[in-house]
Image (spheres, grey):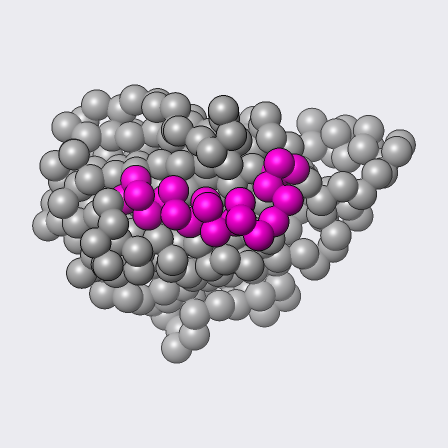
Amino acid sequence: VAKFPVVISTWKNEKANTAAWESLQKTGRALDAVEAGARIPEADPNDTSVGYGGFPDRDGNVTLDACIMDEKGNAGSVTFLQHIMHPISVARAVMEKTPHVMLSGEGALQFALSQGFKKENLLTETARKAWEEWKKTSKYEPKINIERHDTIGLLALGNQGEISGACTTSGLAFKMHGRVGDSPVIGAAVFCDDEVGGACATGLGEFVLKTLGSFLIVELMRNGKTPQQACEEAIMRIVKRYNYKEFQIGYLALNKKGEYGAYAIQPGFNYTLTTNGVTKVHESASYMK
Ligand code: SD4
């Protein structure tokens, strides 16, 4: 159990958690914290799964997905967004400044530009080289690389104990042009309900979409499961129906008491937790050993 405020994020994301924690010291709001955290890997050229420096699709375009949800049930998201370094902040603007939840592609870009976001080239030399290398065989295998991925999902309890969540990604490396994953879908990659808590996801998004994992986890917690039990049950729904040995999914959950849980299909999923200003990376339990 962690007392609030609390920040938890997928993978090894100490810098993101630190930024989220600093934001909590300033405004105390969970929503500000998850946005501030998500912006760190978005701007990091060395993070090849998120924002600037993200690996492109199989035609060489960096296309981004992100979503954000607050304690009041407000939500915003962008899918298939190009040329904008901070999709999470565009998602927040969709939530706060439009009557809609999701904007996609060209429309999302036009909206971002109207809000003062800058159009940029997000394809780094490293990512372009990796794509050139991939093109030599261009074996289209839409599988998550089990060892290496970094999509960030974050959950935070603010100073008042309110819950918010966010997720941001460049999606699967070398995906089909136009492919949208789970990360911008409210209920799939992120869900929050201030009566219960929140959940977020990473991994091969198609299976998070097919099982609506984050919504499922929050509903399981509503019905009495601990965050850990809820994450395990959501993973079992995938294990029972799909060829789970082929891919990775990891879930995080945080309830209103500050209890958290983490579970994945494969070993190797880790998460970053910040409580009392102390940030630490933990290994998640997993179904396969
Ligand atoms: C996706 N869920 O686009 C993302 C990928 C991911 O770490 O989580 N990578 O399917």
* Res. 10 image quadrant: top left
Q: Main secondary structure of the magenta part?
A: helix
User: Residue 141 at x, y = what percent?
Assistant: 76, 41
Up-down relation of residue 122 to residue 187 (above or below): above
Residue at coordinates 39% horizontally, 29% vertically from top-left?
285
Residue at coordinates 43% horizontally, 74% vertically from top-left?
100
Residue extending farthest bottom:
99
Nearer to us in this view, 20 or 223: 223
Residue extending farthest right:
136
245 in the magenta segment? yes
- Quarter of the picture containing the N terminus is top left
Left or right, 22 with reference to 234: left
User: Residue 94 at x, y = what percent?
Assistant: 42, 66
Left or right, 268 with reference to 283: right
Magenta range? 227-247
Left or right, 282 with reference to 88: left
Residue at coordinates 14% horizontally, 28% vertically from top-left?
276
User: Residue 249 at x, y = what percent?
Assistant: 51, 41
Up-down relation of residue 135 to residue 253 (above or below): above
Numbered circles on residues, count: 0
94 in the magenta segment? no
Residue at coordinates 29% horizontally, 30% vertically from top-left?
273
Up-down relation of residue 34 to residue 136 (above or below): below
Observer able to see residue 289: yes
